Amino acid sequence: MKILVTGSAGFIGSYVAHALLDGGHEVVGVDNFNDYYPVALKDARHRRLEAREGYRGARLDLAERAGMAALFKEHGFDRVCHLAAQAGVRYSLENPFAYEQSNLAGHLNVLECCRHHEISRLVYASSSSVYGGNQKVPFSESDPVDHPVSLYAATKKANELMAHSYTHLYGVQTVGLRFFTVYGPWGRPDMAYWLFTEAMLQGKSIKVFNQGDMKRDFTYIDDIVLGVTAALFADGLEPYEIFNLGNNQPERLMDLIGYLGDALGIEPQMDMLPMQPGDVPITFADITQAQAKLGYQPTTNLQDGLARFIEWFKTWNVAE
């Protein structure tokens, strides 16, 4: 198939593009290379893709209606994997309009292009953040998600609602994936595991929010990619689907810090701080639906995944 991957210079998008190329598909990648985190990392991911046969990349903002329409017309995509978004909970408190542009206008433009070019299936990134401050765990796709605690979460919930309306009105098959704290090599520098590793190697203290009393369902990138590719190709899916993609095992933040310290051979120095606005104390994915319909089964535990990240990170630091 010929598949569009948006956010192809991003963390998850670049991995998915490689996996699709490995499967013999033709991939067109779109990214706007914004400077939310260092563009050098996005450029490095993109260079690896451009070196591969079957890949074409475009520097384009999703909200550019004419540019996106032309791209769809030129390529005649079979399926679309929409992973581009303005990420980050805390950043949404400071720069709300970046989320309006990318996560709302950009998502709507992708939906419109899929509608007008009769795309058979759209898979798109949602987020565990839509569960907000839900107390019931594990989080299930059938749980109410009407109380987001950050603008980022609100935009992701809006994406699901917009997709539902396009499925209902125009018959576009849409599959939303609620990602749970994805980590690994080539990851995002704004994530806690990266920030902690960087600070420890520089001999600095790390900022630990909510006095360390937090749990996250950390999910290794290779496991996420298997879920995304299954969502693109699985048979028997309903016209509108939502799936959790997590590790189904919340881990204590203090254990994450301990694993990093052990792997680096460094005793972490910690600044214990209160909970930040927009944060939640726990995320925990019920993956029953993804197991049943996508054959999704994560296999990488946190300790092993962090060891692989650190091995890569030391190489990246030297290379860059």
Image (cartoon, rainbow, N blue to C red):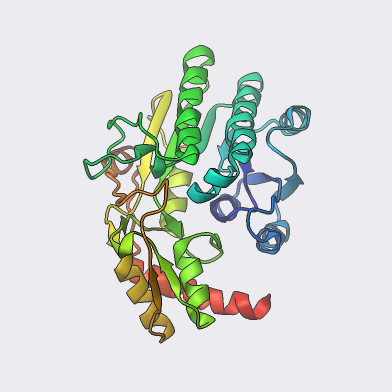
Which residue reaches farthest left?
A: 136
The vertical placement of 78 against 305, above or below, is: above
Residue 279 seen in this snapshot: yes
Residue at figure coordinates x 46%, y 34% from the top left: 154
Residue at figure coordinates x 46%, y 76% from the top left: 205
The location of residue 135, given as percent across then percent down, is 23, 41
Q: Quadrant of the C terminus?
A: bottom right
Query: Quadrant location of residue 268?
Result: bottom left
Q: Quadrant of the N terminus?
A: top right
The vertical placement of 15 against 157, above or below, is: below
The vertical placement of 173 against 19, above or below, is: above
Of residue 213 and residue 2, the one placed in the foreground of this image is 213
Query: Quadrant location of residue 192?
Result: bottom left
The location of residue 94, given as percent across then percent down, is 57, 46
The location of residue 239, given as percent across then percent down, is 43, 23
Of residue 61 and residue 134, the one placed in the foreground of this image is 134
In this rendering, would 287 be left or right of 261? left
Query: Quadrant location of residue 255?
Result: bottom left
Of residue 139 and residue 27, the one placed in the foreground of this image is 139
Which residue reaches farthest front?
A: 274
The location of residue 85, given as percent across then percent down, is 58, 42
In this rendering, would 108 be left or right of 152? right
Residue at figure coordinates x 65%, y 27% from the top left: 109
Residue 78 seen in this snapshot: no
